[in-house]
Image (cartoon, helix red, strand yellow):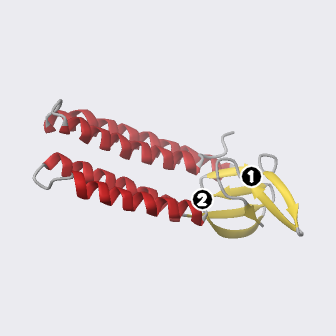
């Protein structure tokens, strides 16, 4: 039985789609496509991509509802990334604004579209970096963001100072319970 969809995979899919849009703008700027061909090619791609993500989420939520998780013990929210990674993001954001100030001309529509695509990508990364994981602790495991259930066997658990420290697969931060 499937125990949900990893939240990280969904976020990577969203970043991937934003990157594809930015690449499409770059192709448009080189003159290989006109705007109509762009919409004919990339809008269906994005619709199919969103449908696949929607189906993944629907199946995930349906399987988690049916799953026997045991009794609910505790709920907590944890920051997803450390402050070091956020500082790196701020440096990249400043670098991005410097580069766009130098290279983007407001006369060229395509460079404005590229700039807006990169801004959307930066906003998406900011949302990911400031996201808090909602973790629900059950008798048989933990539920992350309501879409992925990990049994206690799947987690790496360490004891330190009378507290459990969990290392969840694909999540960069250790969580203390």
Q: Residue at x 69, y 69 (%)?
A: 75
x and y, in percent, of residue 60 in the image: 58, 46
| Along the viewing direction, whichever of 23 and 105 lies nearer the viewer | 105
Q: Is residue 70 visible?
A: no
Above or below, 101 against 33 in this view is below
x and y, in percent, of residue 46 in the image: 33, 41
Q: Which mark is residue 68?
A: 1
Q: Which mark is residue 145?
A: 2
> The C terminus is located in which quarter?
bottom right
Labels 2 and 1: the sequence-earlier one: 1
Left or right: 79 with respect to 162?
left
Number of residues whose C-alpha sits closer than 10 Å to that of mark 1, classed few (under 14), some (14–19) or many (20 or more): few
Q: Secondary structure at mark 2?
A: loop
Q: Residue at x 51, y 42 (%)?
A: 56
Toward the top, the furthest residue is 32
Left or right: 37 with respect to 116?
left
Q: For residue 119, which quarter of the picture?
A: bottom left
x and y, in percent, of residue 54 in the image: 45, 46
Q: For residue 94, which quarter of the picture?
A: bottom left
Q: Residue at x 29, y 51 (%)?
A: 117
Q: For residue 27, which quarter of the picture?
A: top left
């Amino acid at each position: 039985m499937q125990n949900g969809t990893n939240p990280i995979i969904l976020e990577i899919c969203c970043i991937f789609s934003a990157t594809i849009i930015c690449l499409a703008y770059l192709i448009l700027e080189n003159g290989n496509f006109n705007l109509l061909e762009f919409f004919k090619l990339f809008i269906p791609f994005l619709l199919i991509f969103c449908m696949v993500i929607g189906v993944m989420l629907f199946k995930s939520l349906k399987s988690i509802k049916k799953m026997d998780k045991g009794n609910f013990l505790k709920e907590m929210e944890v920051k997803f990334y450390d402050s070091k990674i956020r500082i790196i993001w701020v440096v990249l954001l400043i670098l991005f604004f410097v580069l766009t100030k130098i290279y983007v001309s407001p006369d060229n529509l395509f460079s404005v579209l590229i700039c807006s695509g990169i801004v959307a990508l930066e906003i998406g990364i900011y949302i990911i970096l400031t996201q808090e994981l909602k973790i629900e602790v059950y008798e048989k495991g933990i539920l992350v963001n309501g879409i992925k259930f990990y049994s206690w066997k799947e987690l790496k658990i360490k004891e330190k100072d009378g507290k459990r420290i969990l290392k969840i697969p694909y999540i960069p931060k250790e969580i203390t319970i």
